[in-house]
Amino acid sequence: MSALLIAEHNNKELKPFTLNAITAASQIDPDLHVLVIGHNADGVAKSVSEVPLVKKVIHIDNPIYENYLAENFTPTIIKQSESYSHIICSANTFGKNLMPRIAALLDISQVSDIIKVISADTFLRPIYAGNAFATVKTNDKKKCITIRPTSFEPAATSGGSAEIVKSEGSDEFTLTKFIKREEVKSDRPELGTARIVISGGRGMQSGDNFKLITAIADKLNAAIGASRAAVDAGYITNDHQVGQTGKVVVPDLYIAVGISGAIQHLAGMKESKIIVAINKDGEAPIFSVADYGLEADLFEALPQFLEELNKLNTIQK
């Protein structure tokens, strides 16, 4: 039997984390099929077919799938899953909303947020906010798996020629109705996939002070993150939250400003390639995971940092 990966997209473009999930799924079973559910998403299906690791694309097109609703996707995926040994998705907002429903209806145990594939039935996943790791083996005949995308490299996007097969969906779920989508438009890199992230914590003291971080982010072409404490205090919106209950990021460079380093925050960023911490408390836990630490008042350090960046007069791409 093959593995079935659920693609995340917006009917126009494939979401980047799907490529990371493809890499992981191909390690579980090289005979990887990808399910594209949407409306007028022919371009997405074609782009998936060009990924060398993908062996087949199943494309379901129906107006009821124009806007993502887990209630509509779930019965369709259950129907498609009959001939597959593994059902796989990214462990992001999309997958966390969708996959538990599938596991429940199939009466199987979901293996969540895996970071390493040991074998087709054995996986490594973080527990206790990333402070320990569990090796999990599932004996279910059909396996429901979510992938931590930042733990796997994205798959190549060209060179493949997988077959695209049209299929039928299920009836519309009428008890839930899509009303509207509100999206924040920004030229800034997406937090989950940015090469550089600069985050602020409670030490920023107010939302107005985040303009110090914004100025540096503009120079570095960086995404802006925040600790839960900063979000709960109303300094910044929750879509910027990094941590166990926010987004998990693995950028090349993570700059933590005024963040003490609570265990919940560390769970979301400690796998970053290089971590820089700026905090006036030399005993702050954030320094335990930092590659470079600056014990200083952020209101003095950030203007100096920006001044040096302005001398370089270079925006990173």
Image (cartoon, rainbow, N blue to C red):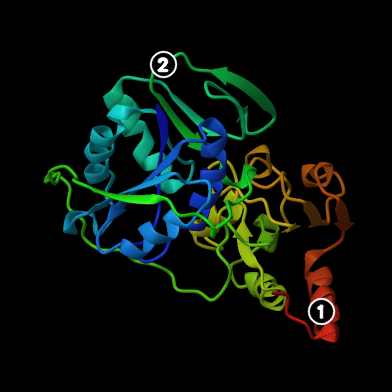
Q: Which residue occupies the foreground of this view, 250 or 34?
A: 34
Q: Nearer the viewer, mark 1 or mark 2?
A: 2
Q: Check disc 1: other Cα within 10 Å, few if <14, some if 14-19, many if 20+.
A: some
Does residue 15 appear in the picture of this structure?
yes
Q: Quadrant of the N terminus?
A: top left
User: In the image, residue 133 lies at what x, y percent?
Assistant: 66, 25
Residue 230: quarter of image: bottom right
Check disc 2 and report its element: helix, strand or loop.
loop
User: In the image, residue 180 lies at what x, y percent?
Assistant: 25, 63
Tell me if 204 is positioned left or right of 281 in this view.
left
Residue topped by disc 1:
309
- 8 relative to 237, above or below: above
Q: Check disc 2: other Cα within 10 Å, few if <14, some if 14-19, many if 20+.
A: some
User: In the image, residue 8 lies at what x, y percent?
Assistant: 40, 52
Q: Which mark is residue 284?
A: none
Q: Residue furthest top?
A: 139
Q: What amino acid type is highlighted by mark number 1?
A: Leu
Q: Which residue occupies the foreground of this view, 308 or 200?
A: 308
Tell me if 118 is positioned left or right of 91 in this view.
right
> Residue at (62%, 52%) from the top-left corner?
227
Residue 122: quarter of image: top right
- 85 relative to 172, above or below: above
Residue topped by disc 2:
140
Tell me if 181 is positioned left or right of 248 in this view.
left
- 59 relative to 224, above or below: above
